Structures are given as C-alpha cells and as structure tokens.
Image: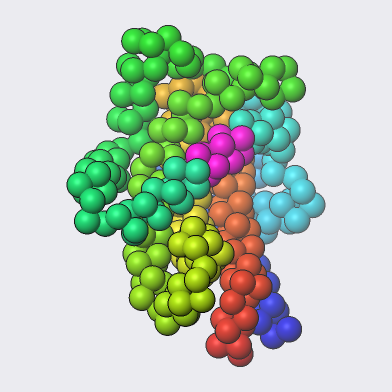
Amino acid sequence: MKFYIKKIFDFLLTVFLVTLITFITFNILPGNPATAILGADADEAQIIQLEKEFNLDKPLAVRYIFWLTDIFKGDLGTSYRFNVKVNSIITESASVTLSLSLFTIILTVLIAVPLGIFLALKNKNPAAKLIEFIDQIFISTPSFCTALLLIIVFTIKLHIFPSMGYTKWTDNPVLCIKSLFLPSLSLALGSSAILARYLKTNFKEQLEKDYVKTAYAKGLSPLYVNIHHILRNSVLSVITTLGLILTEILGGSIIIENVFSLPGIGKLIAISISARDFPLISGLVLYLAVICITCNFIIDLLYSVIDPRIKRTAK
C-alpha cells in the first residue's frame, strides 16, 4: 500500500509543479496579451478594461491562485483568440492527437518487436547489419524530414496516401486510417528503431540465462521459448521504453500535425503561441503534460504487477 501511496503522491506533486512552471513561463514572456487581442491601435482605456476583465491587472501570485482554482473546477478559461472555452477547443482537437499517438504506438510495436527479436537472434547476419544501419539513420533523422520523404514517395510518386487533411473515424474509418498513416509512420520509424535496439539488447541478455538453457534441454521448440519465455521476460524493458517514446511522440506531433495540416493539439499550440493566447497555450501544455505524467504513472503501476520485486524494493 505504501508503494501506491508514494506513487500517487509523486503524481500529484508532479502535476502541481507542471501547473506552476507552465503559468510562470507564459506570464513572464514579454508583451501584453491585451494589446495582442485589441491590436496596436487600441487606446489605453480599452487595454485597461480588458486587463481587468481577464485579471491581468492582478499580481502574478493572485492570478496563479485564480487559475489553479479554476483548473480544480474543470475550467481552463476562455481563449483570447477564439473567445470560446478552452475545454471545448481541447476536446475537439484532442481526438486527432490521441488518434495519431495511438496509431503511432501500434505501428511502433508492430515494427519494433519482430525487428528486435530478429536482430537479437540473427545479429551476425548481413541483413541484420543492414537493418541496424537503417535504424541508425531513422534515429538520427528528425521526424519532419522523414515526413517529407514519405510524402514524396507515397503521395507525389505513388498517389496512395493523402499528404494533408483529416477524416473522422465516425465519418469514414478507411479514410481516417489513410489520413493518419503517413503522420503516424513518420513518428513510428524513429521510435521503432529505438525500441528495437532496447529489445534486442534485453533479448540477447535473456538468451544467456540458465532458464533458457533449461527450456531447450526439456525439448521445447525455439519458437515457444522465444515467445513464452524470453519475450515475456523482456516486456519490462519494452514498457519502459514505450513510456519514454510516448513523450517523444506527443512532442513530435506538434511538428507533424503542422506538416500534414492535421487539426490537432500540435497545430493549436502553434496558433496560440503566435497569438499570445495564454489560456489556450497553458491549457494545451497542461493537457499534454498530464497525459505524459498519467501514462508514466500507469507504467509504474504495471511494473509492480509484472515484476513484484520492484514493489518490494520500493518498500
């Protein structure tokens, strides 16, 4: 029980620190949001009136308390640019970003797991050496460069997948998958290369363990040993890496959504920064941060289920 209480406390403390850092960061930036909203031609009286309306005339600490209180009430404020509740804007765009992230994780696992096993079992094979070289290229290449290459190949040359736009799953599932395939693949190629390397290293370590030699001595088939013994004991490293990769995927989606013109959170962040829309940008950053923290919190709990020794060590 102490293990779970500690994890919950760490979760709440991290969320609090994220709110504090987010608020301070976007409030100490130069410029006046009231001027950005009204324009350079606005007179002093209009600016003062708007500052009072949005509590911009209050001290920083007071504004933070007001903002934090509203967050606990489930209210992220009203967007300066769109004059709409931030909650409704995020709800509308979050489905795109979450769909992109989920599709990317699925592609990452589907590519990385068989690739990692192959590299571990056939590490001296010339094909494995070639794959490792290609992996290094994708790890080193920014996702937006990969995206441009995929657009050239699959959109301009082959005319298979669209390079922009988004179709909702409820409107047309096939078109939804097609609209998300290239953006997801742009993020998944680099992520799967990283995950495959971690899995390869862990898989090779497990191959040298005594329980594997015992399993082979019992006459079990290599396929059964690889899947039911070695891979199961390598899952912990895969989950650990996926937690780190998820953060990179959410960060990379900010750029990728702009490359493919997807109406997600990444595109909204770019708009809100240029408009100095503090309620919107702070709400978006907080939303992404809470998702990352929650996913890592869930992964920590999965550790204790998969390997109870972690819980005993924490005690």
Q: State the image coordinates of residue 77 (x, y, percent, origin top left).
A: 70, 41
Identified at 57% across, 81% down, the residue is 310
Q: Answer left or right for 157 relative to 37.
A: left
Q: Answer left or right for 296 relative to 52.
A: left
Q: Quadrant of the N terminus?
A: bottom right
Which one is nearer the viewer's eye here, 28 or 156? 156
Identified at 63% across, 19% down, the residue is 174
Q: State the image coordinates of residue 31 (x, y, percent, origin top left).
A: 44, 37
Identified at 69% across, 44% down, the residue is 76
Q: State the image coordinates of residue 18 (x, y, percent, origin top left).
A: 55, 59
Magenta stretch: dominant SS?
Answer: helix
In the image, is residue 52 above or below residue 245? above
Residue 239 covered by magenta stretch:
no
* Quadrant of residue 150 within the rendered picture: top left
Q: How many marks?
A: 0
Q: Is any atom of residue 32 visible in this view? A: no
* Quadrant of residue 119 within the rendered picture: bottom left
